[in-house]
Amino acid sequence: MILLAKMVTIRPVCSKLKEVAKRELNEDESQIQSHLKVIRSWLAECDLQCDKIEDQFLIAFLRGCKFSLEKVKKKILLFYQIRFQLPQVIQNRDPLDPKLLKVIRMGVAVPLPRTTKATDPKLFIIRVGNFDLTECTFADTMKVGTMINDILMREDDQMVICGMILIIDLKGVSAGHLMQFEMGLLRKIAIMNQDASPLRMQGIHILNPPAGAQAVLNIFNGLLSEKNQHKRIFIHGRELETLHQHFPPELLPEEYGGTLESIDNIVKQWQNRLIENRLYLLEMASMSSNKTISPPAMPLLNESFIGSFGTEGSFRKLDFD
């Protein structure tokens, strides 16, 4: 049974973020408590059987849905439904587990700490080629990424309010990586990270496209939700000058021509942060472990994506150099 909070406990945000939340997300401080009461009453009726839901968790969904209560209900339901269908991604997520620690240390998903302005979208680097095929599966890397997202959703007000920009680095991506991309798993993960998440994507920058770049780009484009298909996608080559036109060096790690510390140091900081949040991460997994509500209706995939790769199976037939 869900425990109803006796008092609203939401972390205050700075004045600049407060202005953005009011202007762009329809946030009205005087209405927050009543909105939370409505959502908690609805959650109790749904009997989601979780031990605890924090106000900070709920305010992330309110902000992500621009304070539309009906959209919040749909997104939260989908959040639980799709996670229940992805046990290989959501369960067994103890950051002290030696196998999972190896995946964390690969640094496939790395949030960056700085932005130019306090109201800019946060930056998130995805180093696809960094996942070691001999040590883990694609689902393992997504598990770590989801753990990071759970912490960001709980702790990073700037990302919740202003959204994120993805920098997807394809350096080192091989046919072996693509063979891990099974259609059904990719589809569910895309739903989890877009339709079922309150974190909003504001743009995508792709680095180091390989020889078979079009096949990879078709995968990314086909998995974007209808809303995110309208976001700007920038393709960069192997040089960093064009990336620096969008993000100055002071925002980027030294591996990307920046003046921040090395990305390996940022990964170590996130390893510690995941361990510090261990109990919360385990609790989030338990919230999605026993759901009796009906499975989600899957959003339709991009037609060109279906036409290129079929409706079932993996991407083993891709022509990838």
Image (tube, rainbow, N blue to C red):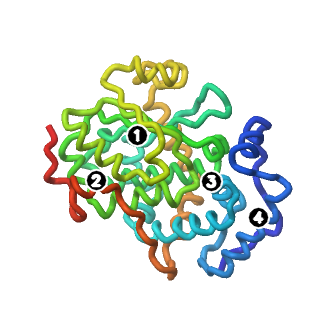
Q: In which quarter of the image is residue 93?
A: bottom left
> Which residue in the protein does label 3 denote?
64
Alpha carbons under labels 3 and 1: distance apart: 22 Å
Residue highlighted by disc 2: 305
Residue bearing the label numbered 4: 35
Does the image show residue 276? no
Q: Mark 1 points at which residue?
A: 126
Mark 2 or 3, nearer chain start:
3
Type of amino acid at the residue the image marks with label 4: His
Q: Is residue 308 above or below residue 184?
A: above
Left or right of 196, for residue 299 = left
Element type where label 1 sits in the image: strand
Instruction: Give the distance between the C-alpha atoms of the residues marked 4 and 3, in whole angstroms.
Output: 14 Å
Q: Are marks 2 and 1 in contact (CB under 8 Å)?
A: no
Judge whether residue 239 can be spotted in this image: yes
First-in-chain label (4 vs 3): 4
- Callout 2: 10 Å neighbours few (<14), some, many (20+)? some
Amino acid beneath label 3: Gly
Image location of residue 66, percent across then percent down: 67, 54
Q: Relative to 257, is 71 on the left or the right?
A: right
At a point 18% along the width and 44% down the height, the residue shown is 175
Residue 261: percent from the left, percent from the top? 50, 24
The tag earlier along the polypeptide, 1 or 4, is: 4
